[in-house]
Amino acid sequence: MDNSKEITTLVKEQGPLHYMLKIESFSSIGALLKGCGEDCIKSSEFSAGGCKWVLKIHWNENKDDQDKSHISMFLRLIDKVKPGEVVTAMFRFYVHNQKLGNYLVVQDATGRQFSVAKSEWGISKVLPISEVMDSSKGYILDDCCVVGVEVFPAKNEYKVATLAVVQKNSTRQYTWKVAKFSALADARLDSPVFTIDGISWSLSIYPNGHPRAKGESLSLFLILKDEDGSVFASGNRVFAKYKLSIKDQLRNDSHQKNVSHWFDANLSGWGYDNFIPLSDLKDRSKGYLENDELVIQVNFESILRITSV
């Protein structure tokens, strides 16, 4: 959505009223997410005007002409709207000029109607990517970019969040040995809780398959364990790129699958219903079950975390 007559740009000394996102490691986060099939950064949820929203930042690249590549920003309504109902809102996107101490504001002068059919509106050309990445312009400082949004009509509910790469402070691998596999019931079985770089996780299996793969495959999932509610507080989210594997104990090999997922309060687990066919798993020549023991591993490649200040 871009109509030049409806889009206006100005500079303000004050920051946004409702939400601000500090994006650390800006130059690498975009490439990391793209490598995982993610086409944008999605903020944590925030409230404005009695509704819940998410800010989305896209790299709208033009490979043939980099001068035409832009940063795009969109606003998505998270609240469920009944068919026929609409939420009308005006919005402004902010990009902090950290060199000059002010904010570039790009706004849509027309109230947009968010509905079941159209829950997302935005501006496809907020700033050229070349201008954002040029440190002399002031929009990026120490590889950090700060963006924000205002939504009207809205209550004065201000929230600041940070999207950052979780630093590697420990071995990002966990091994779970499941003994007496043949005696397990069909019900879900969870591993002990383990911690990787300050975040608690567990692995879950359905030995005879999740209901969607019952009797066909072993199902394997990674679960983010937010037992005290601190990780997902205020709509915070965690992104992980990881590898799930079952060890071939005869050949020092493994059956493995790569996964990437945004974990939040609504979807705290992710993996595969059909991780490995039961026929392969129970084939003794393949080495997955030795002495009736199954060896499962998870290896984390990267973790991102959105936290509210």
Image (cartoon, rainbow, N blue to C red):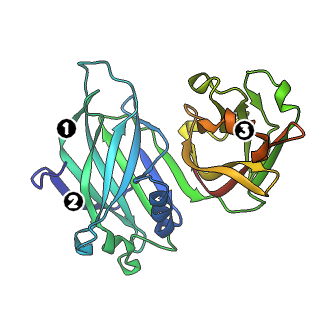
Which of the 4 quarters of the picture holds residue 79?
top left
What secondary structure is marked by label 1?
strand
Number of the label disc, if any, that sits on residue 266: none
| Residue drawn 35% across the image and 39% down it | 76
In the figure, is residue 59 to the left or right of 297? Answer: left
Residue sitting farthest toward the front: 285
- Residue 3 lies, in percent from the top left, at 12, 51
Q: Is residue 167 above or below residue 250?
A: below
Q: CA distance from mark 3 to mark 2?
A: 60 Å
- Which label number is shown at residue 9? 2
Tag 3: Cα neighbours inside 10 Å, few (<14), some, or many (≥20)?
some
Left or right, residue 155 beside residue 167: left
Earlier sequence position, callout 1 versus callout 3: 1
| Callout in the foreground (3, 2) | 3
- Image position, residue 104 (x, y; %): 30, 62
**Which residue is located at x 49 percent, y 60 percent?**
23
In terms of sequence position, does the residue under pointer 3 or pointer 2 come before the other? Answer: 2
SS at circle 2:
strand
The percent position of residue 263, horizontal first and vertical second, equals: 58, 41
Task: For marks 1 and 2, give the CA distance.
Answer: 16 Å
Mark 1 residue type: Gly
Q: Which residue is mark 1?
A: 111
Disc 3 marks which residue?
Answer: 281
In the rendered structure, which amino acid carries the disc numbered 3?
Leu
Pick out the residue farthest to the left: 5
The three-letter code of the residue at mark 2 reads Thr
Asked if residue 292 is positioned above or below residue 298 in the image, the reply reads above
Using a 10 Å C-alpha cutoff, classify the residue at mark 2 as few (fewer than 14 neighbours), some (14 to 19) or many (20 or more).
Answer: few
* Residue 199 vertical placement versus 22 (above, below): above
